[in-house]
Image (cartoon, rainbow, N blue to C red):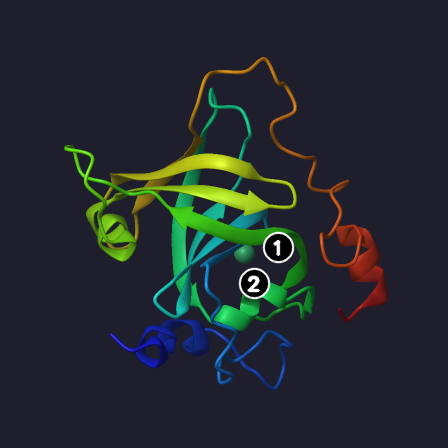
Amino acid sequence: MAAEDRLRKYRGKRDFERTREPSGQAAGDVGEEPRFVVQIHDARRMHFDFRLEVDGVLKSWSIPKGPSTDPGDKRLAVPTEDHPLDYENFEGVIPPGEYGGGTVIVWDHGTYEPLSHDRRGRPVDFAESLERGHATFRLHGRKLHGEYALTRFRSGDDEEAWLLVRKGPARSDRHGTPDPRRARSVRTGRTLAQVAAAGDG
Ligand code: MN
């Protein structure tokens, strides 16, 4: 499916006269290595948005507690609609009453290496591995580094649920996830409160 078609759901939820989020009309940068971004979104409920560039869109999951660097943590990740590539740079305030109304900061971004393989260890197309419900990848971010797995454990249109887990030996690291209210933007160094106070982005 063309990226344009896959963004229909994203566009249908938003009024671009009112929100400064990107409409996805711009092509976005397609680099050599696929990109990832983690945003912190202080909406009705605080959550992290985890997005991976796949075939011209950002595949997206909402992670209430955020990605953890501790392999002992299994983090619930609920899929959300595909986002345009230039959403990676969105930081600012979505007006109250609009879809996702609240403040967004870009907490981390970078590239990732697809690592998905089958049971015999042969590489599998990354998009296909996501469709099948199990994908592995190595993040090269400013804050997140190393291998992670996303695994679907429940299917169904409105109740699909995944887990995001750091791979590797368990660590005694008790600080696997930042406090979202203290965390700072990787782009501008600002907290959610500072972005909210600035009112724009
Ligand atoms: Mn969100």
Q: In the current view of this chain or complex, which residue is farthest to the left?
A: 120
Q: Which structural element holds mark 1?
A: loop
Which is nearer the eye, 102 or 62?
62
Task: Name above or below for residue 125 compared with residue 182.
Answer: below
Percent of width and height locating residue 175? 65, 24
- For disc 2, the marked residue is 100
The kind of residue on which mark 2 rests is: Gly
Judge whether residue 118 can be spotted in this image. Answer: yes
Q: Position of residue 131 (x, y in %)?
A: 23, 53
Q: Is residue 40 left or right of residue 198?
A: left
For ligand 1, tell me if the residue under mark 2 lies within 8 Å: yes
> Which part of the image, by quadrant, shows the N terminus?
bottom left
> From the viewer's perspective, is residue 118 above or below residue 158?
above
Residue drawn at the location 47% of the way across and 71% of the way down: 30
Q: Would residue 38 be visible to someone looking at this image?
A: no
Instruction: Please tell me which residue is depicted at 39% across the width and 70% down the height of the picture.
Output: 56
Mark 1 sits near ligand 1, with its Cβ under 8 Å away: yes
Q: Which residue is mark 1?
A: 43
For residue 177, side relative to residue 167 (left or right): right
User: What element does badge 2 sit on?
Assistant: loop
Label 1, label 2: how far apart the Cα atoms are: 6 Å
